Amino acid sequence: MPAWGDGAPVPLKDDQISAILTYIRSEWGNSADAVTTGEVALIRGTTKDRKQPWSEKELLALPSDLPPASVAK
């Protein structure tokens, strides 16, 4: 999947990414919580030096409760 950050041809802002993720998480019978702009900013900040795409193995190894909702609010 192409990058959505600064390296993308048309970089998406944190609020745009949170809107996309919230839509995906709430459509098609899903009822997950919204993804906040703060959560996107937190993850983007902690992974800003990453230069390569995430592998499936790496994504599956991430804790399911990241980031803490209290940090992103």
Image (spheres, rainbow, N blue to C red):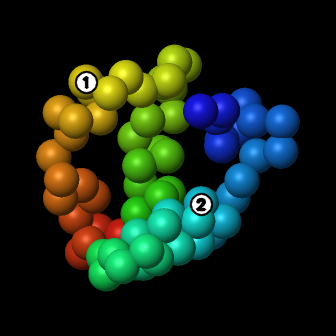
Report the residue at 46% width, 76% height from top: 27
**Residue 7 quadrant:** top right
Mark 2 touches mark 1? (CB < 8 Å):
no
Q: Give neighbour class at mark 1: few <14, some 14-19, many 20+ (Cα, 10 Å).
A: few
- Residue at mark 2: 17
Kindly tell me whether residue 32 is visible in this rendering.
yes
Mark 2 or mark 1, earlier in chain: 2
Question: Residue 70 in the image: x percent, y percent?
Answer: 24, 75
Report the residue at 69% width, 58% height from top: 13
Above-or-below relation of 71 to 63 = below
Drawn side of residue 7 relative to residue 54, left or right: right
Drawn side of residue 23 relative to residue 12, left or right: left
Q: Which callout, 2 or 1, points to the residue nearer the camera? A: 1
Q: CA distance from mark 2 to mark 1?
A: 23 Å
Kindly tell me whether residue 36 is visible in this rendering.
no
Which kind of residue does numbered mark 2 sit on? Answer: Ile
Which kind of residue does numbered mark 1 sit on? Answer: Lys
Drawn side of residue 54 relative to residue 67, left or right: right
Q: What label does residue 69 carry, if any?
A: none
Point out the image quarter for the N terminus: top right
Q: How many numbered markers are drawn?
A: 2
**Residue 25 quadrant:** bottom left
Question: Residue 67 in the image: x percent, y percent?
Answer: 27, 58
Point out the image quarter for the C terminus: bottom left
Report the residue at 17% width, 33% height from top: 61
Question: Residue furthest toward the top?
Answer: 52
Question: Residue 3 in the image: x percent, y percent?
Answer: 64, 35
Looking at this view, is 20 or 70 the one in front?
Answer: 20
- Residue at mark 1: 57
Above-or-below relation of 40 to 15 = above
Report the residue at 49% width, 46% height from top: 44
The secondary element bearing badge 2 is classed as: helix
